[in-house]
């Protein structure tokens, strides 16, 4: 078992503890929208940005202002925001059955090629918390620019336990 | 209570009337697809463009050909199209429980920063019709270009009353 | 009845046979994600790229490196991948009720205008297999760049038979 992928045991809540990932407070909207909506057994989340305390923690274009490693970190911060938003709404991550769907949008230069590695910054965190047998489908898209000039935005849909 | 946000009372249909928003005829496809599909208690809509009578009402790039205010108007026209499409399919907006999910794609210059304000053009209309307690999750993405050279396209999913 | 749109008779499986579309092996991930996830009666698929045997079959930007026709072919290869992934998971296409939702992202030059025609490369295949009364809603978006430098990526959601 590779060192940075701890064995998957116990609940998502206990995994979150053992990863030592400290959850920030849940994100708050930048406009007329909700962070979380529950419908049809699914939990839909707003596009998560790499923000901390409502301020962008990463700014710029991937392949110019940030390299792959920094962009990967930004994707992880987005994923932490998603987990904080879901936990704030649900009370506990153990009400989540799995991540269903993950779209990763990154503001990248035209010649950038490391998309999957950047997106893994979010995917790997979800895998470590919810387990390798609960991985989401994923789309990865290179775009022109994102709100607040952040380099990465992720769209997440969770499935809830019945 | 701010003047342009009327108090939310009554049904979506009655709100639509009191807003004085005149619905155009429902949009029709530009290719091999449907405007509306119902599945699993949700109503999925095709990407709505700011078109009137199958012709683009706004053309160009946000931050170059259009400023934030014009782009915000374009987003509102997209949202009106979504409401017209849903109403055409359902018969009445009162069959809609809420907007679940809204993605706003805007063709913007690389240095554009006013994304949330543009997206509010759509979100605010939905809020005024369905109520501030029924707001959707939202993703906002700056892209290179959109069909028919329109500046904004929105993707909307509604939840239906059981 | 137009020649290239065969009459819709029989099951999706029998239509696939009669179209002579040879399915490749199901796609495999380029990162920490799953190709297919089933939830709430829907089948979510990862963003499908025009890859054959895990290698891109088309590379470059639409409007510069590829024209509309080649990009349309690339979109069709994406759709074939989606069908291969769904069939691999379900055992038979006849468990699919319809395509619910199709998003087509294309890496296009800023002045490209043929988006709907490119997207029809995917939509037309789905129509021919699942029938013209089962068409999906669709969003089409022009973006900066896509993983592996492919010109087109599609996001597909199927509804399953109960």
Image (spheres, coloured by chain):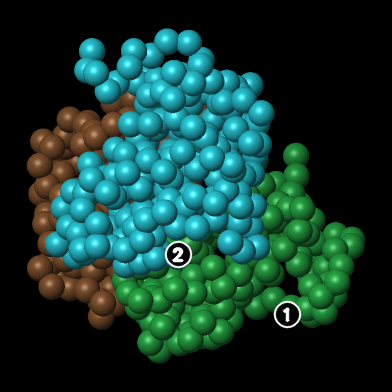
Chain colours: A cyan, B green, C brown
Using residue A35 as the reference point, say whether residue C134 is left or right of it. Answer: left
Q: Give the image location of residue C91, x and y in percent.
A: 33, 22
| A101 is higher (above) or lower (below) than C152 | above
- Identified at 11% across, 57% down, the residue is C59
A63 vs C15, nearest the viewer: A63
Q: Secondary structure at mark 1?
A: loop
Q: Which residue is mark 1?
A: B22
- Residue B145, quarter of picture: bottom left
- Identified at 40% across, 89% down, the residue is B65
Q: Give the image location of residue C154, x and y in percent.
A: 32, 50
In this view, the residue farthest toward the right is B10
Name the disc covering residue A147, or none.
2
C122 vs A30, nearest the viewer: A30
Q: Give the image location of residue B73, x and y in percent.
A: 58, 81
Q: Give the image location of residue A76, x and y in percent.
A: 37, 41
| Residue B47 visible, this angle | no
Q: Can you say which quadrant of the picture contains the C terminus of chain C?
A: top right
In this view, the residue farthest toward the bottom is B65
């Amino acid at each position: 078992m590779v060192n940075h992928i701890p064995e998957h045991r116990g609940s998502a809540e206990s995994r979150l503890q053992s990863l030592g990932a400290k959850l920030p407070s849940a994100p708050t909207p930048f406009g007329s929208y909700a962070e979380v909506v529950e419908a049809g057994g699914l939990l839909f989340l707003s596009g998560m940005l790499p923000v901390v305390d409502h301020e962008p923690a990463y700014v710029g274009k991937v392949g110019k202002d940030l390299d792959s490693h920094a962009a990967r970190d930004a994707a992880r911060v987005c994923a932490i925001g998603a987990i904080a938003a879901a936990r704030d709404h649900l009370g506990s991550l153990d009400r989540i059955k799995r991540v269903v769907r993950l779209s990763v949008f990154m503001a990248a230069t035209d010649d950038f090629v490391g998309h999957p590695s950047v997106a893994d910054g979010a995917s790997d965190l979800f895998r470590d918390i919810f387990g390798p047998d609960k991985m989401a489908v994923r789309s990865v898209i290179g775009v022109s620019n994102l709100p607040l000039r952040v380099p990465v935005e992720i769209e997440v849909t969770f499935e809830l336990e019945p």
